[in-house]
Amino acid sequence: MMTIRFTDDHEWARDDDGIITVGITDFAQQQLGEVVYVELPDIDRVVAVGEEVAVVESVKAAGEVKSPVSGTVVAVNEDLNDSPELVNDDPSGNGWFYKISPSGPDELNALMDETAYEAMVSALA
Amino acid sequence: MTSFAGYDMPVHYQGGIIDEHKHVRSACGIFDVSHMGVIEVRGADADQWVESLTPADICSLQPGAQRYALLMNERGGVVDDLMVSRLQDRLVLVVNAACKNNDFSYIRSAIGDQVEVTMHEELALIAIQGPKAHSVLGQAIPEVGTLSFLRTLSKSSEFGDILISRSGYTGEDGFEVALPAEQAKQFTEHLLSHPDARLAGLGARDTLRLEAGLCLYGHELGPDISPVEADLNWAIGKSRRLDGAREGNFPGADVVYSQWPDNTESVRVGILPEGKAPVRDGAELVDANGNVIGTVSSGSISPTLQRPVAMAFIQRSALRSGTQLFANVRNRHIPVAVTNLPFIPHNYAR
């Protein structure tokens, strides 16, 4: 069962058999504009919920990616180093940022589901 | 859209900043810069009055010519940077949006009722920039083909009474056209009917001027930054320098002369950071021992060079010693090289 959840800060977190993949939403990449640089966390870094773990920069601005869940970083998307535009082209697929092994199993379910997130975004528009 | 100087401004149109930027370098971008101020100074000795506020040589400006100028304060700092054009019967000043009301009061209070000073809120200002700008604007106004760089032309046209100068803020050839606001839409649509023309927003305007090494008020210019510090000695007319024919007689002249030609602690330079991370406005520059020796004033990615570029104020002593510098970005020290400006050679139609 694949669960996807969303944060107020426009990150998405998807549970694939116990490992959670994190990225930014389509709305977030549209707001940022063309992504020109991504800074990823170190593998094995232990992060808390809401901790700034990655940086995403467009021509105009820098934004932080805050971890939707706590745990240990187990993989990062190295493709973003040479092709940061993947964040724009495919934010919920090839534009993922990092994978985390969660330390608290219930954190993901506390976040918004897709319906709730879409309602929040349409209220912003 | 973003809020800028009280105006809702498009950061970019459909293609995004990078595409718009590249289009200006290769063809032609159209910018709506109507937020900027157009101030007219009219009357006997208008040139002398304007010259009394700036170290630019205004009195010898010939009719039809345009020049870059700095409006100064008593501390030797800059109130605004502007373009001054002389027409047969008046001077026309194009000033920054965020400064225009202050500029207007400053000019009015300095020169009183001696000459007529008018803010033209009814005018729109459209910038047409890039190597194809002459062809795009030429389709609407054929005479522009013979207008040289830094020349201004006033004429009546199907778009009303318009003022065209061959200048801009991108480092490319181009024009700025002031025209009645109610004509702006029709005029811009006419320009956009040219296959080489497309709209460009505030985002591309910023990366273009950064690559061209041009100062932005509030970043490289301000009330506590002198022209010598900003490396704008060239904006001080030869006749306005110490021992020049019309030396002094501008606010802060004593400060500027005491600094001349390079007697300031810091100076504006170009910065090339190593790697891919943008180094932005406000980042500290440090030496190997962590001593702060400068601050970044503007920084982004250069769409042309596809690498980070920045401008910064750094201590002249560090420049002379050639010490290795680092930018402090999120507590990482990124090595940077100091370089001459501009990053991209200017492409003006001289």
Image (tube, grey):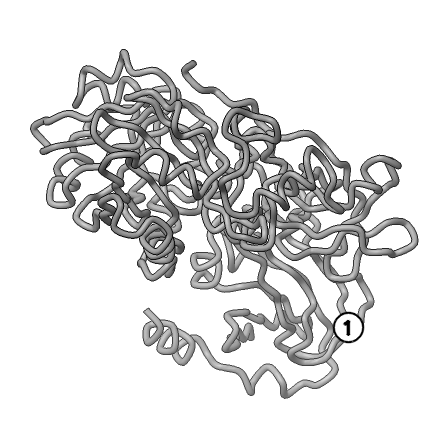
Identify whether A53 is placed above or below A103: above
Residue extending farthest top? B146
Q: Nearer the viewer, residue B82 or B305?
A: B82
Identify whether B306 is placed above or below B60: below
Residue B345 screen position, x and y as percent: 56, 22
Q: Residue under label 1, please give it.
A: A72
Point 32% across, 30% down: residue: B85
Q: For the residue marked with disc 1, what is the amino acid?
A: Thr
**Tag count:** 1
Residue A66 in sight? yes
Residue A7 screen position, x and y as percent: 52, 76
Point 82% across, 52% down: residue: B286
Is residue B209 rendered to the left or right of residue B338?
left
Point 38% across, 28% down: residue: B59
The part of the image, by quadrant, that contains residue B341 is top right
Considering the image in quadrants, where does the C terminus of chain B appear? Answer: top left
